[in-house]
Image (tube, rainbow, N blue to C red):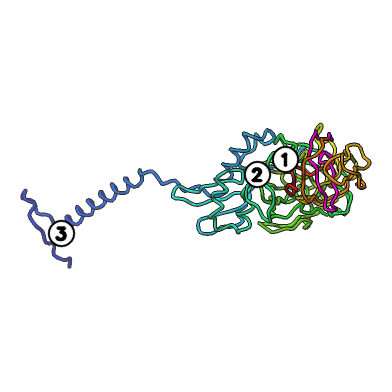
Amino acid sequence: MPAAQTGHSRGDGHTHTQVETDVIRGQAIAVAAGIALSLFATAPAAAAPADLESVVAEQLLGQTTNNRADLSTADESDARITVTEEADGWAFGTAVIVAEKKEDAMPEGRLFLAKRTGKGWQVSFDSDAAFVEMSKTAPVLSKEERERFSPTAGLDGDVSVNATDLRTQMALPWAVGQTWTMTGGPHPWGSSGAYASMDFAGGDQVVRAMRSGTAYTMCTGWVRVIHGNGYATDYYHLWSNISANGTPVSQGTYLGYTGTDVTCGGSATGRHVHIGFRINNAYASLAQYAIGKWVPNAGAAYGGYMLHGSYRVNPGGGVYNYGALGLTQGFIDANGGGTVNQRTGPGTGYAVAGSVADGATVTVSCSATGTSHTGRYGTSNLWNKLSNGRWIADVYLWTGVSNPVNGWC
């Protein structure tokens, strides 16, 4: 037997049953729910924050395509972003834009720091002024990395990079005592403009760090070493290269073998190492800087030559690695070969006290002014007292600076 239905008056003489009342209430609830759903459906969805890799790639592409003609058509598919350290809302890593695999094209590579903020990721590259400031507090960096990233900071009393100081404390990128072939003289790194690159091959094929620093693997076949004081060196086309992420290296540390790797672009027709010379996080001309006690001189791209004293080597010739030139050392440049007189005092009015051969390395104790002479690089009245107590005119000694390297006598 059905349950009895109760009702109440509507005020118009009609009485609702309980069932009718429940239906009306249900319809009202449904309408309200529909209105609410409609409101939610038409509200704009919040944009998802961009991922770190995309932010880094976009910013690097913006800088690179405007400054590098050989990379002007690169897009996000050409970006290789690697986050190597991440902690406390910070990230650190490498960012590379690969080049086409053709002659005279080269990749672009940077180190980056990123900090998460309420608006997303704040990113800076090692070529940006903000990078140094961010590195001071970034928990993803070591103390040594912070010191090396600053162009004006130094380790072990190193000199700072400036236009009048051509000392680098670098050896050539192979073992001291070996002779390799210079297969390409000074030339640009891609379309970077500056003649920052040279090519070498031969010897035992082992590529070594030109100076101590911290090493980073930019991509397969490519290692960068940050030396401090604004100096850095790149090594490309390597085979079996090290995997490094801020790895400390000493001068002469193994980085890889010469090879033909073009994972990140460019070309290589035979085994060699392509070095890149960087000052203050940009490719810079290596002409006139001392490397392994040689002074590169630029000419046409891939031409030029290297000088050790008066001895000249052109592309295709052998280059002996004498090691790095010390900060108080120089090597004799007789400006034509032969020998240079040593004297008992700072000038030609003093007696001759022997001679020293062109290309020989000597150590300077102090300097003084004396009679004026003209050498390969100009005229000067500066004289240097050597560690043996004898004197030679500064114009016949390559030190990398025009001022005393070890104070005044």
> Is residue 379 one of those drawn in magenta?
yes
Residue wearing tag 2: 281
Mark before the other along the chain sequence, 3 or 1: 3
Front: mark 2 or 1:
2
Identify which residue, 334 or 211, lies in the foreground: 334
- 143 vs 257, left or right, is left
Secondary structure of the residue carrying numbered label 1 = loop
Identify which residue, 313 or 65, lies in the foreground: 313
Q: Position of residue 158 (x, y in %)?
A: 69, 51
At label 3, the amino acid type is: Gln
Identify which residue, 280 or 56, lies in the foreground: 280
> Is residue 242 one of those drawn in magenta?
no
Q: Residue furthest bottom?
A: 1
Quadrant hosting residue 310: top right
What segment is highlighted magenta in the picture?
373-395
Secondary structure of the residue carrying numbered label 2 = loop
Residue wearing tag 1: 106
At label 1, the amino acid type is: Met
Front: mark 3 or 2:
2
Front: mark 3 or 1:
1
Secondary structure of the residue carrying numbered label 3 = helix
Residue wearing tag 3: 18
Q: Where is residue 190 in the image (x, y as percent from the top left)?
A: 73, 37
At label 2, the amino acid type is: Asn
Mark before the other along the chain sequence, 3 or 2: 3
The local crowd at label 1, few if under 14, some if 14 to 19, many if 20 or more residues have their Cα within 10 Å, is many
Q: Distance between the residues labelled 3 and 1?
A: 83 Å
Q: Which residue lies furthest to the top in this view?
A: 300
Q: Distance between the residues labelled 2 and 1?
A: 16 Å
